[in-house]
Image: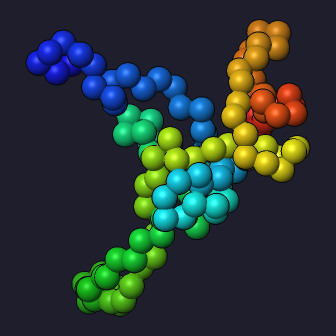
């Protein structure tokens, strides 16, 4: 909590609706319109790393002790979860999701076609 007794945005965030190995659609930012697989999610920071989106280029110096040659390394950078939308495999469109209880467990359901998405 801050000095006024209010929670910060990071403290307000609950469980993320995007998980590793999901296919997502980037809805905002430089890579808007791209689609990719989620490599990892960091819920405490509210970001995800998406394959092929927000690619950063880092210069690496050569290190003879590690037998590492110098050059440029390309890797994915973080994207805010608010800029990602889950991609439904059945209707082939980006969609919002709902959580439905089926028996003793909850599953994620597409808001467009009402089909379950991925593993629960």
* Image location of residue 11, percent across then percent down: 33, 24
Q: Position of residue 61 (x, y in %)?
A: 26, 86
Question: Residue 12, relative to residue 21: is it above or below?
Answer: above
Quadrant assignment, res 51: bottom right
Q: Quadrant of the C terminus?
A: top right
Q: Quadrant of residue 85?
A: top right
- Residue 21 visible: no
* Residue 74 vertical position relative to residue 108 in the rendered view, above or below: below
Q: Quadrant of residue 99?
A: top right
Q: Nearer the viewer, residue 76 or 83?
A: 83
Residue 33 vs residue 62, the one in the foreground: 33
Relative horizontal placement of residue 70, taking residue 114 as reference (left or right): left
**Horizontal relation, residue 95 to residue 43: left or right:** right
Residue shown at 36% from the left, 89% from the top: 71
Which residue: 82% across, 9% down? 103
* Residue 7 to residue 117: above or below: above
Residue 80 coordinates in the image, percent (x, y): 45, 47
Which image quarter holds the N terminus? top left
């Amino acid at each position: 909590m801050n000095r006024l007794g209010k929670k910060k945005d990071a403290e307000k965030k609950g469980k993320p609706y995007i998980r590793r190995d999901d296919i997502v659609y980037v809805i905002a930012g430089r890579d808007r319109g791209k689609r990719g697989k989620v490599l990892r999610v960091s819920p405490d920071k509210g970001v995800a790393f998406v394959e092929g989106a927000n690619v950063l280029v880092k210069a690496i110096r050569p290190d003879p002790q590690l037998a590492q040659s110098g050059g440029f390394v390309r890797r994915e950078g973080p994207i805010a979860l608010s800029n990602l939308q889950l991609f439904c495999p059945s209707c082939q469109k980006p969609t919002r999701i709902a959580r439905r209880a089926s028996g003793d467990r909850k599953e994620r359901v597409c808001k467009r076609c009402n089909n379950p998405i991925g593993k629960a």
